[in-house]
Image (tube, helix red, strand yellow):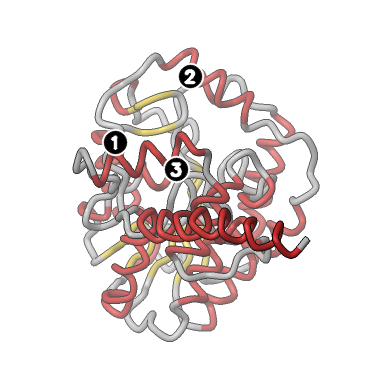
Amino acid sequence: MKKFLKWSIIFLLPVLLTGICYEILLRKIPNDYRYKKEYLDKNARKIQALFLGSSHTYYGINPAYSSVPGFNAGYVFQSLDYDLAILRKYEQAWDSLKYIVVPVDYFSLYSRLGTGLEAWRVKNYNLYWDMDMSRNIVEHSEVLTNSLNANATRFTGFYLKKNSFITSSALGWGTGYDSTRELMISGKSAAERHLAKNDKYFNENVAILKSIIEFAKAKNIKVVLITSPAYRSYVDNLDKQQLGRTTQTASAIAADYNNTVYFNHLSDSSFAESDFYDGDHLNNAGAKKYTLKLDSLIRTAEKNGSF
C-alpha cells in the first residue's frame, strides 16, 4: 500500500505542478475584466459618469462621447448583483461620481449571471475583479472552469500568436460590433433566449436595483435607469407580460426616488437599421448616437430638476 501511495505521488506531482503553472500562465493573459478593475483602481476618483450592465451597455454606450469623464464598467451577461458589487468595491473612491447609468432591460429583473448558461464567467470576477462572488472552488480557477480547448486557444493565441484578448476601448466600451448582421433572425432568437422561465429572481433583483439607488442617494449621486434600444425583430417577439412588468417596475422605482429617472428607448424610432449590430445590440455608430442622446437627456433632466 505504501509503495502504491509513493508511486501515485511521484506520478501525480508533475501533473499537479504542470496544472499550477498552466493556471498561473492563463491568469497572466490580459483580459477585459482585469483591464476594467485596474482602470478603476487608478481612476475611480476622477469618474463622473459610470455605466453598468450587460452587453447592451457594454457595446451600446461609448464614454468617449460623454460630456463628463465617464467609464463603461458593464460587460457581457453582467447582472445587477455584479453591478452593485462593483459600486461597493470602490465605495470610498467615488469622490467625483455624479451619475450612474443602470440598464433595466427585458431580462434584467429575471436573470442572474451565477445561475445561467454563462455562469462560467463568475470566475472572472473572482480572479480579475478581486471579488468573492462564489464559494465554489471551481469558480476561482481558469483550469477548472474552462474547457481544455478554450484554455488551449487562449494560451496559444497569446503566448504563441501574440493575439490580444482585450476587446474594450480605453474607457471600457466594447469595440467589436462595428458592422450590421442579419437583423431579423438574430432579433427573434435573442428574444427567445431572453424569455424568463419563471420569476424566481424578480423580487431579489428589484431589491438589488433599489440597493444601487439607495447607495447612490447616500452619496448624492443621480441614477439613470434605461431600457436600451433594440431592432423591431427583437421588440416584436418579446413577451408582453414580462416586458410590461419590467418597464412598469422601472417607472415605479424611478417615481419613488428623487435621485432617479427612467428612459425607455426600446422602440426609439430615431435608431435606424444601420445603427444596429444585431437584433438587440447597437453597433459602433449606434453607440455614438445613443451616448450623445443619453448625455443630452441627462443634462436636460438635471436642468429641469427631474432628479
Give the structural element (helix, strand or loop) at label 3.
helix
Give the structural element (helix, strand or loop) at label 1.
loop
Place of residue 21 in the rendered image (x, y in percent of width and height, measured from the top left): 40, 59
Q: Work out whether mark 1 precedes mark 3 in sequence or the reverse, and give the earlier one.
A: 3
At 38% from the left and 80% from the top, the residue drawn is 94
Q: How far apart are marks 2 and 1 (CA)?
A: 17 Å
Amino acid type assigned to the residue bearing label 3 in the image: Ser
Q: Work out whether mark 2 precedes mark 1 in sequence or the reverse, and give the earlier one.
A: 1
Q: In which quarter of the image is residue 199?
A: top right
- Tag 3 residue: 55
Viewport quadrant of the N terminus: bottom right
Foreground pick, 81 / 209: 81
Amino acid type assigned to the residue bearing label 2 in the image: Ser
Amino acid type assigned to the residue bearing label 1 in the image: Gly
Foreground pick, 173 / 300: 173
Which mark is drawn over residue 186? 2
Which mark is drawn over residue 176? 1
At 33% from the left and 71% from the top, the residue drawn is 40
Foreground pick, 172 / 28: 28
* Observer able to see residue 34: yes
How many numbered circles does the render carry? 3
Foreground pick, 22 / 221: 22
At 51% from the left and 18% from the top, the residue drawn is 233
Mark 1 Cα-neighbour bin, 10 Å: few <14, some 14–19, many ≥20: few
